[in-house]
Image (spheres, grey):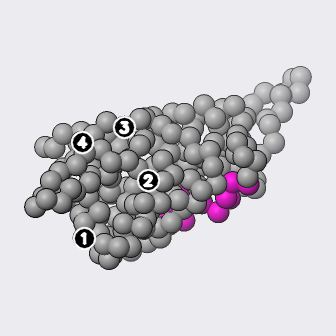
Amino acid sequence: MEANPPDYELADRMALTSPDQVKAIGHPLRTMILQLLHERAATVTELAEVAQRPKSTVAHHVDVLTRNGLLRVVRTRKVRAIEERFYGRTARIFHVTAEPSPAGEQMPGDFNDFVVAARESAKAFERGKLWGFIRHARISEDQASQFWDQMVELVDEFDRMPRSGETMYGFAIGIYPTDHPALPAAQDSPPGESWTA
């Protein structure tokens, strides 16, 4: 069994405070790169081989992520007089802050992890390998926020699981307000009336 990933030091959480940072994680190839680096640090060459994309393309996207503070060089290695750079994430979890951008810029509103999850999970659904639930509950905003904190802990636990096996699994989790109908609050029984189940 392998050690807990990844093989470099990184922060637990990082707030994305600029539109460029949010745009950076919204690109499918950059999302893939960030997900791969949950496993271990990697070079542009390694990432290009796994992603099956040209090295120049991957190098461009790694540069975008690095310029926006989402990746950093965590170590280097000399190979035939050439220095190879190994890139790692700067945090396990990136989250979009609810605070306005320091420069007053509008944050992008089109980044959606569930779009990625829906696309990725289609084949698993066809093979009968998709495990999931959806629930609706009428709760307060404070309760939703507290529950989100618990979900973040679960994501962190998933990220830290020792790597083993041959299959890569996706894990999607979220909470969001909906227009789903809800029953009104239950009425107290009128005097002289009793309830039975």
User: Which label's residue is closer to the chain start, 2 or 4?
Assistant: 4
| Residue 139 on image: x %, y % | 70, 37
Q: Is residue 88 above or below residue 120?
A: above
| Mark 4 lies on residue | 7
Disc 1 residue crowd, few under 14, some 14–19, many 20+, Cα 10 Å: few
Identity of the amino acid at label 2? Thr
Residue 71 shows up from this direction: yes
**Does dot 4 land on a helix, a strand or a loop?**
loop
- Quadrant where the C terminus sits is top right
Looking at the magenta stretch, what is its main secondary structure?
Answer: loop
| Mark 3 lies on residue | 10
Q: Magenta stretch?
A: 106-116
| Mark 2 lies on residue | 66
Instruction: Look at 56% across and 40% down and name the residue there.
Output: 15
| Residue 113 on image: x %, y % | 53, 58
Identity of the amino acid at label 3? Leu
